[in-house]
Amino acid sequence: MKYEKQVKDKRTAIMEAALKLFTERGFHGTSTAQISKEAGVATGTLFNYFPTKEDLINSLYFEVKGRLSRSMGTGIGIESIFQERLRRLWSNSINWGVDNQEEFLFVGQFCSSPYITKYTRKEVMKEYIFLHNLVNEGIKTGESKDFSPELTIAMFYQGSRAVVSLILDSNVALDKDRLIEKGFQIIWNGLTNK
Amino acid sequence: MKYEKQVKDKRTAIMEAALKLFTERGFHGTSTAQISKEAGVATGTLFNYFPTKEDLINSLYFEVKGRLSRSMGTGIGIESIFQERLRRLWSNSINWGVDNQEEFLFVGQFCSSPYITKYTRKEVMKEYIFLHNLVNEGIKTGESKDFSPELTIAMFYQGSRAVVSLILDSNVALDKDRLIEKGFQIIWNGLTNK
DNA sequence: TCTATAATTGACTAATTAGTCAATTTTTTT
DNA sequence: AAAAAAATTGACTAATTAGTCAATTATAGA
């Protein structure tokens, strides 16, 4: 028990330190020595949990993506109507990015780095199955336009990232909800029939 | 004359080599020695043209962004109607990304790296003045919805990047024009009144 | 041609890198 | 409490890094 806990703590400490430094200084701009120091462990300990630096980066990505995915899905019951569910997905995504700036930037960095493989990209896509389902449902009921789901999801996802960046850059907290709503109107008008 | 030409050739060779290697292996994953070798010059020559590696990265970014900007604006005469001009801007952006994959990936990498400053971000935004103008014009004539121009431009820009990624990933050349057109329908429906 | 200026070279350096491993400490089991 | 197993340490290494600089080569104008 106690042992389990401590292991988790060190692992977590390393991942948190890595997340912080990666977003501050980039992947290669951050050395394993710096990460260890920030986490308060010896360099050897880092390599005990993550055989290589690349392994650490990838583990971190899966972890963070999992959190985003779970966060997106919260509060989406089958009872609400299509528009409300899509809107909830939209605001959940954006709020997660705004509230988890480091994670948001890290994901952006990793996804546009040459280290992400097609496999990883595909693997992570699986986590968006509920968005996929929602879009397909909308198409079936005739509420969504019949674009390809891939296009719809890509526009939705990148659109939400655009809004997060806008909010983070403008640092006017009051704008947040307005930008989320306006952004949703664009997506909604774009993707649905009326 | 001859001297001018040769200077340009070495500079260009270095930038081209850097672009290739950066997209293949990332900024820090690429050493100045590797760039020099790929460009066919001595390491000293690289530092003759670019005082630091960071300077090289930034110069490359401005250069590439300039090319994109120029490419976006081609063929947009004042004679055509609003929708046609916006559509042209849309397809120009996407086609540039598809035809210049390295540049496209490099821009994505740089923009989500921690090395891009707010200054650079703003500076580059100036190059999108014509998109800004077009959007404002649309709002004035009542064709565009009255969202903030920043939001509109961000959604437009990130949307176009989403489509490029989709096309590059799917590597089905036939899908290209269909995806561009479908993507435009989303943007158009989202941003305009009817 | 001769001279001055600018461009190019690559061996070099001091610092940093990811990753190792034998020794030590902590935890679990008996 | 003693033994076994697992976790942690940090000094260490071989390789690589960005950037320098004195020597060399190419170019320009007279």
Image (tube, coloured by chain):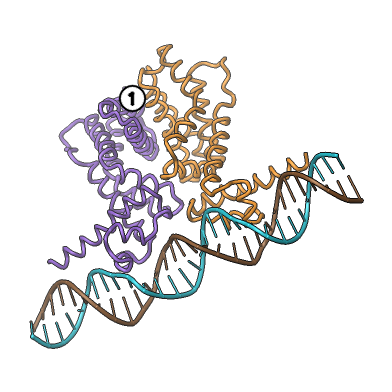
Chain colours: A orange, B purple, C cyan, D brown
Q: Mark 1 lies on which chain?
A: B
- For this rendering, which residue is in front, A87 or C10? C10
Determine the residue located farthest toward the top in the rendered image.
Answer: A141
Q: Residue at x 49, y 56 (%)?
A: A29
For disc 1, the neighbor class at 10 Å (few under 14, some 14 to 19, many from 20) is many
- For this rendering, which residue is in front, C23 or A190? C23
Position above or below: A189 against C9: above
Q: Give coordinates of residue B176: x percent, y percent.
A: 27, 29
Amino acid type, residue under disc 1 in the picture: Asn
Q: Give coordinates of residue A79: x percent, y percent.
A: 57, 14
- For this rendering, which residue is in front, A62 or B152? A62
Say which element carries label 1. helix
Q: Which residue is drawn at 35% across and 21% down?
A: A147
- Which of the 4 image quadrants contains residue B15? bottom left
Q: Give coordinates of residue B156: x percent, y percent.
A: 34, 35
- Number of numbered discs on residues: 1
Position above or below: C15 against A15: below
Q: In which quarter of the image is the C terminus of chain B?
A: top left
Q: Give coordinates of residue A1: x percent, y percent.
A: 77, 38
Position above or below: B105 against A75: below
Q: Quadrant of the N terminus of chain B?
A: bottom left
Q: Which residue is drawn at 54% across and 31% down?
A: A69
Q: Is residue A17 left or right of residue B110?
A: right
- For this rendering, which residue is in front, B141 or A80? A80
- The residue carrying mark 1 is B189
